[in-house]
Amino acid sequence: MAPAFEVKKPRKIWEDADVVRLFASPLFTTYAIPEGADPGMDAAYWVPLLALYSGARIGELAGLLVADVESGDSSPARFLIGKAKTRAGRREIMLHPELLRLGFLDYVAAMKEQGRTRLFPATGILPDGTTGKYLSDWFGTYRVAQGAEKPGQDFHSVRTTHQAGGCGMGSRTQKLAEFS
């Protein structure tokens, strides 16, 4: 009897050289935000970095609300994933010090000051209410243009890399810090 679900092939983690190549691009070194609707403006910069340092899914990040980010006045800065793919996906994630150094809380404050509800208002929302599809499609093209292209790697591979302990500490973080 066949299983009732499809077993997906595991995604490959990003190698150090691919992570550095991608995050050494002008988007991440000079905040050269791409134009057009698909990349979602500032989301093109922040969502890959948030994924790299948190392991969150693209849809979870693209759908964040300004109110989901807590600045850490009385506790460590963090964001809340309330709308997730699974019930276990609802969680609280501490913000990595590198995200703080890069100014993520300043970006959140600017969105709040503008009266925004969504943290990344330029990301598209599909009719079913999900976010991240257009950003994911754009990211696939962008990473190939930066030379970070290997079979089995996509945006979700950033999450897999984080889960494998590839980011957030050690050599990759040090290498990334050299470019920002």
Image (cartoon, helix red, strand yellow):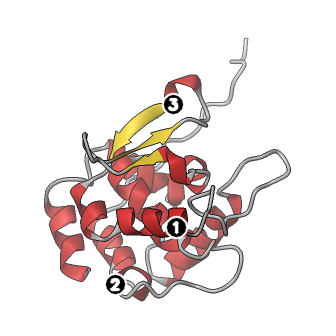
Q: Is residue 63 visible?
A: yes
Which residue is found at the position 38% from the left and 68% from the top?
A: 106
Q: Is 71 left or right of 140, judged from the image as shown? A: left
Q: Mark 3 points at which residue?
A: 90
Residue 113 circle label: 1
Q: Where is residue 50 in the image (x, y as percent from the top left)?
A: 41, 57
Vertical side of 41 occupied by 12: above or below: above
Q: Is 92 left or right of 172, judged from the image as shown? A: right
Vertical side of 131 occupied by 8: above or below: above
Between the residue at mark 2 and the residue at mark 1, the CA separation in whole angstroms equals 25 Å
Which residue is found at the position 59% from the left and 56% from the top?
A: 62
Q: Where is residue 169 in the image (x, y as percent from the top left)?
A: 17, 53
Nearer to us of marks 1 and 3 is 1
Vertical side of 140 occupied by 71: above or below: above
- Secondary structure at badge 3 equals loop
Of the residues under marks 2 and 1, which one precedes in the sequence? 2
Of the residues under marks 2 and 3, which one precedes in the sequence? 2
Foreground of the two, 20 or 179: 179
Q: Look at the image and tell me in which quarter the N terminus lies.
A: top right
